[in-house]
Image (cartoon, rainbow, N blue to C red):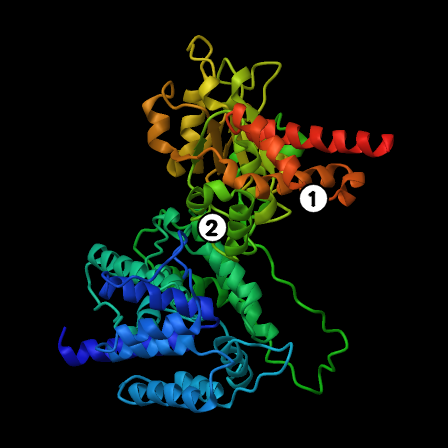
């Protein structure tokens, strides 16, 4: 890369910083770039990578230390601006940023407009005090309303070549300032898929909404009707985006939904036996060309009286295909699931889930981040099979329960007690037995009527090891692999189910007894024991849980320092068990009540 190209790319990065929605978002970009280019510079960061000292004085000192790098120093100066900063200084810093951006070849109109908002910002008591947020709100008011995400627009393309050309132009326009370029067209389909896969990773790494939409669009280009599994990476996201972020008229929405339905049919294997390779874009155009779509409504034809507010529709997936489920002898509850789209529970706010769990488990800050790293806001909840490992009584099961509650009220948990399992009942029992039943994940889907419940296997290390009637470890293994769980044969109901969306969590005190196939498939997260330093916060959380169970406890006063001291001594002798802490706090509150009654 030439020096000139490097400068242009850095100016594109500065524009992205200016266009950040919040101060925290901008800070993440700036910290990441500073750590990459100046690892010797001390930023005084917390464990989560955020700034310990976010004062204007400290941020200005960092900018001064980076004076040799004009772009990076400018970003730190913008970050340091606060309402109390003098207007003259604010104008000077903003003008400096605008002066740098004028040298960029890419379109910088959005960044320039946002910086003008910084200049004109007026602060009132009780109002916004953040430049980035104010500029974001003003920009949202000024720009034309978004039609639909680029990946949703791609559903309208009739040919793969047209979709490729459209994405190339859009990528240059939206991500060119970041130095991201689309791949060249290659007649070799395998080479083309590899190049697109690299681009998708690069776009997702930007952690920006527009780049994420672009990445999904490029993933759509490698969806192959002859490989139904290739659709799994895009269909849930497309369904959600179409129903929640597309601002289009009713007739066009109907066309897009019909075409998306064709994509879902391809994901079920409808065109795996085609005599000649045909792109999904051509198939979707062919299947929907038979449908007559009316012209757009006119003002005379529609007065708006019958208009109903639209609500986002959850992404769905078919768990039991009709052609893979024997109807004869199938219980009615299972019959109702044949070809029935089941909703995928969507994570409402991944950042909030992580932050609230970290607040409840201050001693496991990093571990909670690992546990929640697969969650994405507004997308179906997904998580690698995870094993929580720690000494007894540290609240492993509660972490999983709280994780489900925070993801969504719809998230269902099925708990399986491994300590009482001495056979392979986890995978169900054959239909010939009087006690025939489906596997634990399948029953969780049936009970929840969702496709991605959480199956929690408690104390998996205590399961029976005998192979006489099978064992839990062998029974659970196929469920931890996407390929085997996607077409799982349920002998108890004579059906093949798609269980690949189920989330699997397990708890254990040790992994020594676990076979290698489980250790290889589970992501092991070791939950550390808390210490006395965490006692005040954890005790307060225990009191909150007690108040949720008993309304009379909602009015209890916080624990006094002397009460915490007594609890701390007893808790230390119990090796800091969370279970013991609950008993100690409960006993302390009861003792307090008894003393109050006597007096």
Assign the C terminus to one quadrant of the image: top right
Answer left or right for 346 relative to 78. Answer: right
Name the foreground residue: 158 vs 217: 217
**Any part of residue 417 in sight:** yes
SS for dot 2 = loop
- State the residue at coordinates (71%, 37%): 546
Q: Nearer the viewer, mark 2 or mark 1?
A: 1
Is residue 460 found left or right of 167 in the rendered image?
right
What residue does disc 1 label? 558
Residue visible at 51% across and 47% down in the picture = 358
Task: Give the image quarter of residue 182.
Answer: bottom left
Question: In what quadrant of the picture does the N terminus appear?
Answer: bottom left
Q: CA distance from mark 2 to mark 1?
A: 34 Å
Q: Position of residue 183 (x, y in %)?
A: 23, 67
Instruction: Give residue 409's position: percent from left, percent from top.
Output: 64, 47
**Where does residue 203 sit, x and y in percent of width and height?**
33, 64
Q: Position of residue 553 (x, y in %)?
A: 77, 39
Dots 2 and 1: beta carbons under 8 Å? no
Above-or-below relation of 517 to 373: above
Residue 204 appears in which quarter of the rendering?
bottom left
Q: Earlier in the sequence, mark 2 or mark 1?
A: 2
Compared to 169, does 538 lie above or below? above
Find the residue positioned furthest to the left.
2
Q: Which mark is residue 375?
A: 2
Nearest the viewer among 454 and 430 is 454
Quadrant of the image occupied by residue 25: bottom left
What residue is shown at x 62% (from left), y 39% (from top)? 539
């Amino acid at each position: 890369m030439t020096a000139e190209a490097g400068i242009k790319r850095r100016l594109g990065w500065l524009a992205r910083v200016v266009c950040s929605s919040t101060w925290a978002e901008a800070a993440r970009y700036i910290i990441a770039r500073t750590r990459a280019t100046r690892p010797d510079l001390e930023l005084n960061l917390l464990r989560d990578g955020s700034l310990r000292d976010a004062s204007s004085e400290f941020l200005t000192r960092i900018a001064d230390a980076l004076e040799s790098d004009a772009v990076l120093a400018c970003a730190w100066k913008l970050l340091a601006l606060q309402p109390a900063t003098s207007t003259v200084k604010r104008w000077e810093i903003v003008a400096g940023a605008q002066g740098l951006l004028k040298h960029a070849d890419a379109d910088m109109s959005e960044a320039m407009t946002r910086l003008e908002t910084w200049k004109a910002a007026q602060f009132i008591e009780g109002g916004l005090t953040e430049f980035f947020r104010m500029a974001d709100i003003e920009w949202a008011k000024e720009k034309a309303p978004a039609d639909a995400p680029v990946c949703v627009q791609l559903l309208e393309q009739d040919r793969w070549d047209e979709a490729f050309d459209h994405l190339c132009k859009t990528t240059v326009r939206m991500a060119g300032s970041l130095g991201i370029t689309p791949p060249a067209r290659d007649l070799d389909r395998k080479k083309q898929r590899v190049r697109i896969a690299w681009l998708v990773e690069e776009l997702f790494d930007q952690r920006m909404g527009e780049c994420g939409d672009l990445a999904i669009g490029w993933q759509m280009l490698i969806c192959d009707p002859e490989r139904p599994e290739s659709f799994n990476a895009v269909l849930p996201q497309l369904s959600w985006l179409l129903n929640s972020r597309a601002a289009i008229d009713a007739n066009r929405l109907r066309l897009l939904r019909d075409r998306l339905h064709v994509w879902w049919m391809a994901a079920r294997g409808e065109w795996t036996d085609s005599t000649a390779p045909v792109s999904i874009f051509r198939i979707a155009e062919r299947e929907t060309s038979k449908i007559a779509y009316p012209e757009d409504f006119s003002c005379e034809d529609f007065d708006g009286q019958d208009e109903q507010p639209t609500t986002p529709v959850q992404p769905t997936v078919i768990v039991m295909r009709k052609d893979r489920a024997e109807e004869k002898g199938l219980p009615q509850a299972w019959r109702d699931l044949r070809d029935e789209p089941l909703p995928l529970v969507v994570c409402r706010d991944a950042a909030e889930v992580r932050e609230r769990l970290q607040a409840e488990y201050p001693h496991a800050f990093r571990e909670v981040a690992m546990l929640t790293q697969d969650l994405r806001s507004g997308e179906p909840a997904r998580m690698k099979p995870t094993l929580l490992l720690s000494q007894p009584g540290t609240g492993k099961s509660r972490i999983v329960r709280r994780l489900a509650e925070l993801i969504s009220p719809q998230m269902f948990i099925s708990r399986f007690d491994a300590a009482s399992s001495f056979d392979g009942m986890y995978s169900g029992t054959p239909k010939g037995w009087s006690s025939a039943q489906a596997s634990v994940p399948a029953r969780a889907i049936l009970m929840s009527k969702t496709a991605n419940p959480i199956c929690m296997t408690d104390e998996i290390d205590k399961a029976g090891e005998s192979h006489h009637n099978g064992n839990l470890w062998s029974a659970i293994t196929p469920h931890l692999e996407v390929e085997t769980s996607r077409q799982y044969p349920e002998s108890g109901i004579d059906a093949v189910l798609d269980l690949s969306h189920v989330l699997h969590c397990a708890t254990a005190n040790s992994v020594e007894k676990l076979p290698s196939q489980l250790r290889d498939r589970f992501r092991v997260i070791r939950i550390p024991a808390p210490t006395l330093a965490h006692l005040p916060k954890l005790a307060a959380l225990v009191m909150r849980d007690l108040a949720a169970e008993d309304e009379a406890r909602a009015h209890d006063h916080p624990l006094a320092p002397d009460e915490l001291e007594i609890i701390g001594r007893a808790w230390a002798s119990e090796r800091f068990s969370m279970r013991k802490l609950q008993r100690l706090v409960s006993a302390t509150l009861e003792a307090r009540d008894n003393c109050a009654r006597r007096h």
